[in-house]
Image (cartoon, rainbow, N blue to C red):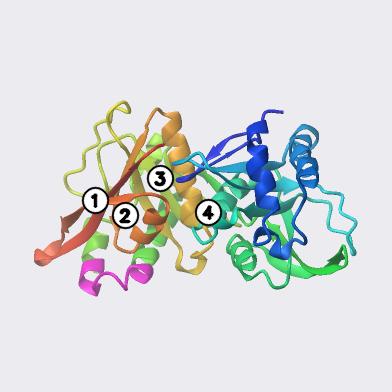
Amino acid sequence: MTVPEIETARLLLRGHRLGDFDACAAMWADPVVNRYFGSPLSAEDSWTKFLRYSGHWAMNGFGFWAVVEKSTGLYVGELGFADFKREIEPRLPDVPEAGWVLISAAHGKGYASEAICAAHNWMDGRAGRTVCIIHPENAASFTVARKFGYRETGRAVYKGRELVVMERLREFRLRIATMEDAPALGRLIDLSVRTLQAGDYTPAQIESSLKRVYGVDSQLIADGTYFVVEAGSEIVACGGWSRRKTLYGGDQLVGREDSLLDPRVDAAKVRAFFVHPGWTRRGLGTMILEACETAAVAAGFRRFEMGATLTGVALYKARGYEALEEIAVPLENGLTLPVIRMGRSRA
């Protein structure tokens, strides 16, 4: 099968190519990379591993991607899902096994989280359960695994080493919002703003912004460009994109500009992201942003723009967005709400 390509803000996940082998072999020969995997690999062993990647896609319909830095074209690692038929005791469940590895120069940049989020978004539509195995001392991998919902289920011995077995159940479902979701979205927006933005805005700003700015945008829903994430039957996050000029605000915002943008010259608008306070730090914002950018690109857009709250700036910076200007959104009684216009171009 053709290996699907997945773009994130900074990375491209694609199938391995023959020209990747030298970089792949150098990675697997690096003692720093192999600290928790075992001894560095010879070129011969790396070649066997390299060929196995193509076989997984052909036989199983899933496999490992090469991870490439978009700005430089540099091969920075690989990750994905496999059925390694490991001789491990006790045996792993008969589900895809996730794995990831980056060159040492790419450590500490957030690349693992960025790529793993994209890979699991793809796999979630195909498998409801995955596992991974991690060395007990590999704190960085534990942090990443837990961030995306992996939980320890036991220990196993593989090639004489004890490893931690972790399992992830597909916890979240991403779908397009409908007008029937509007009441739940209104409650989610209110709770998210009051709780998560309390550290960046005053109580007066929050109260006024909920009256004047924040709220359900029925135009986004009608356009089919607004997403919700469900945990079970509960909506725990929402966000969308728009082909219209309005940069921020719900139905109640005065001065909305709902005329259509020209994707050849205009930036798609990334809009109205809110997460339930009890479901933060689960990668939900990133999940929705990936879906928005993918849909906007499919509609012909190559640039993205948003009006970010002070609370959301860190997330968007991590995703490659840059601050363009500060906007003072007028509220009641002479108050204003500082919002940062941010943007980025597709590489």
Location of the N terminus by quadrant is top right
Q: Position of residue 315 (x, y in %)?
A: 40, 58
Residue under the point 21% across and 57% down: 212
In the rendered image, the vertical position of residue 30 relative to residue 49, given as above or below: below
Q: Compute the Cα span from label 1 to label 4.
A: 39 Å
Task: State the CA–CA distance, disc 3 to disc 1.
Answer: 18 Å
Asked if marks 2 and 1 touch (Cβ < 8 Å), the reply is: yes
Q: Position of residue 287 (x, y in %)?
A: 51, 50
Q: Which residues are magenta?
A: 194-206
Marks 2 and 4, how far apart at CA: 33 Å
**Which amino acid is tagged 1?**
Gln
Q: Residue at x 77, y 41 (%)?
A: 47
Is 64 placed left or right of 253 in the picture?
A: right
Which residue sits furthest left? 334
- Residue 72 makes an appearance in the image: yes
The x, y position of residue 127, in whole percent, is: 71, 46
Mark 2 or mark 1, earlier in chain: 2
Residue 135 position, x and y percent, is 73, 67
Q: Nearer the viewer, residue 83 or 30?
A: 30
Q: Residues within 10 Å of mark 1 (few under 14, many from 20)?
A: some
| Mark 4, residue position | 111
Judge depth for marks 2 and 3 and give the one in front: 3
How many labels sit on residues?
4
Disc number placed over residue 240 in the picture, else none: 3
- As for residue 201 lying within the magenta part, the answer is yes
- Relative horizontal placement of residue 87, taking residue 69 as reference (left or right): right
Is disc 4 placed on a helix, strand or loop?
A: helix
Which residue is identified by label 2?
215
Between discs 2 and 3, the one toward the N terminus: 2
